[in-house]
Amino acid sequence: GQQLNQSPQSMFIQEGEDVSMNCTSSSIFNTWLWYKQDPGEGPVLLIALYKAGELTSNGRLTAQFGITRKDSFLNISASIPSDVGIYFCAGQRIGDDKIIFGKGTRLHILP
Amino acid sequence: DTGVSQNPRHKITKRGQNVTFRCDPISEHNRLYWYRQTLGQGPEFLTYFQNEAQLEKSRLLSDRFSAERPKGSFSTLEIQRTEQGDSAMYLCASSTGQGVYGYTFGSGTRLTVV
């Protein structure tokens, strides 16, 4: 089963607000990835992190690879309607050739 | 290259029937992965190939499931004697094989077993 704890499960925010979500694990990870999934589509990669402490931005999105290598967070600044969707953290554990996923954070933007 | 391609996009089948899905990875990617995603959950790993070799299978992959990648290019996932619990989105991903660099997903095949 899943070994990544992602929170919150869902968020309801106003357009223009900033958003923060995170992911934790009991295992050490080599790589952290953040994906967004729209209904009926596959996950699309937003940000990839390859080194502990790494802070990477992609437009209004910023993600960090935790120093302990057991956590990561994603921030979205100044949210817009097209940010609605499900955000997944995913990671590659040491010695593993695949990535595993959290259960997702569903983002809703109130009109 | 247009990314990872999966066919069909949707499949409705009667319980007990066999179904087969196809995945065409990004052409220069030598690793190919299959995942299953049920409603409200993240994708769960099923199996992966390095070229034509199947290197890992999850406990989720019961003996009714089989995956092949005969020439190291496209892959097929077959489910025999489908059950209602098999209803899910089946996702394929491919990567370069250098760590998880370039891990890219297709749009998935939505299976509904009635």
Image (cartoon, rainbow, N blue to C red):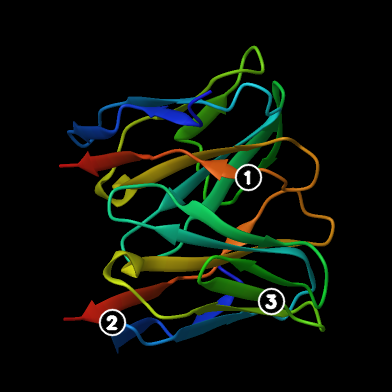
Image position of B34 (left or right of B53)? left
Instruction: Work out how far the residue at label 1 is from the one at label 2, CA to CA, in angstroms.
Output: 31 Å
- Amino acid found under the numbered disc labelled 2: Glu
Image position of A81 (left or right of A79)? left
Dot 3 corresponds to which residue?
A64
Q: Give whichever of discs 2 and 3 has the lower sequence position.
A: 2
Instruction: Work out how far the residue at label 2 is from the one at label 3, CA to CA, in angstroms.
Output: 23 Å
Task: Report the front residue among A4 and A8.
Answer: A8
Task: Report the front residue among B30 and B2.
Answer: B2
Label 2, secondary structure: give it. loop
Label 3 is found on which chain of the structure?
A: A
Where residue B97 sits in the image (x, y, percent)? 76, 37
Q: Is residue A1 visible?
A: no
* Label 1 Cα neighbours within 10 Å, binned few <14 / some 14-19 / many ≥20: many
Instruction: Work out how far the residue at label 3 is from the one at label 1, CA to CA, in angstroms.
Output: 19 Å
The nearer-to-camera label among 3 and 1 is 3
Q: Is residue A4 visible?
A: yes
* Label 2 Cα neighbours within 10 Å, binned few <14 / some 14-19 / many ≥20: some
The nearer-to-camera label among 1 and 2 is 2
- Amino acid found under the numbered disc labelled 1: Tyr
Dot 2 corresponds to which residue?
A15
Where residue B14 sits in the image (x, y, percent)? 17, 33
